[in-house]
Amino acid sequence: MTKHEPEKLVIFDYSGTLSLEAPRFARPANLLLALAESGLAKLGVATPEVFWGEIVVPTWVKGSTTSIGYKRILAERIGALGLAPGVVGAEIAAASSRFVDLYLAHSRIDPLWRPMLEKLAGNPGVRVVIATDHYAEATETIIDHLNDWNIPAGQKGGKGGTAPGFSMKNRELSPLFIANSADIGFGKADRRFWETVRLQLAITSIRSVLIIDDFGFNEEKGDSYGERARVSTRQKETAASVQEIFQASLAVIPFFLKSGERDRKNAGARRIAEAVCQIDHFLNFGDVTRADS
């Protein structure tokens, strides 16, 4: 008997959507604490301005589209700038590693998403992709978060879409597929990202696609990824690329938290609940209802 292929594809963004805490790590108070705790402050990365302007922004493209990893790119950049004269490379690498570990530990998936993710993982008519513009370390971090909930997740790798790189924890094809720009070599707004995802999923029966994504909207001030003009452009380019590659009907849930809502305790929970209702509607009818309807 031929196995029935899924006809629906659900695409989640990670930072700012599944993980509401990931962008909050970049709030000035949180960032300053992490820079101090990790030891980066003593090495010359002591302010948000230096962190964003001298470290992250200049290295973001390389960091998010290659396998170099956040830890190594931090250490190399600090060394290249000469911010810590006389300090040996091993000490810079150790502080960079501690900082990234703090960030990843702060970037867990919100538990309110768990019931929906479990539901989707158990639905043979749906394939789920967690698509993220991120550093290489994020892939295994996301897989570990999901595995902690007994939700199987895996990845394949490479720009060509043929590498067998499944997670060692999930040797069989998992219902949740992690598509990280650092593994694929292109950002999510690039059609080549989605072309690679389609090849790796090896699914030809998709008829409808749903994207749940903040497109960078929920990033904190200082992170240029969240600039409003870039968010708008990224949303349009991502939607166009997905529709072109999958040749399926497309629905988008912009997962936006307004700046005035982000500090309200229940704002994130309310937005997740709205999105869950929209996802359910998509599963039943192939489209979404307005969040404010």
Image (cartoon, rainbow, N blue to C red):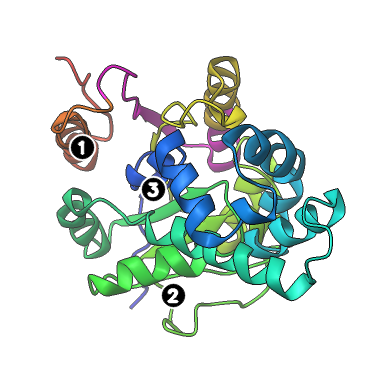
Quadrant (top left, top right, bottom left, bottom right) of the N terminus: bottom left
Amino acid beneath label 1: Ile
Q: Earlier in the sequence, mark 2 or mark 3?
A: 3
Residue 146 picture location, percent across and down: 31, 67
Amino acid beneath label 3: Leu
**Front residue (pair 197, 117):** 117
Name the residue that disc number 1 marks.
Answer: 272
Residue 86 picture location, percent across and down: 83, 64
Q: Distance between the residues labelled 2 and 1?
A: 27 Å
Q: Residue 67 occupies which quadrant of the picture? A: bottom right
**Which disc is residue 292 wearing?**
none
Q: Specify the segment rendered in magenta.
A: 240-261
Magenta stretch holds residue 51: no
Name the residue that disc number 2 marks.
Answer: 173
Q: How far apart are marks 1 and 3 (CA)?
A: 19 Å
Neighbourhood count class around disc 3 (C-alpha, 10 Å): few under 14, some 14–19, many 20 upward: many
Q: Residue at 38%, 54% (x, y): give it.
A: 107
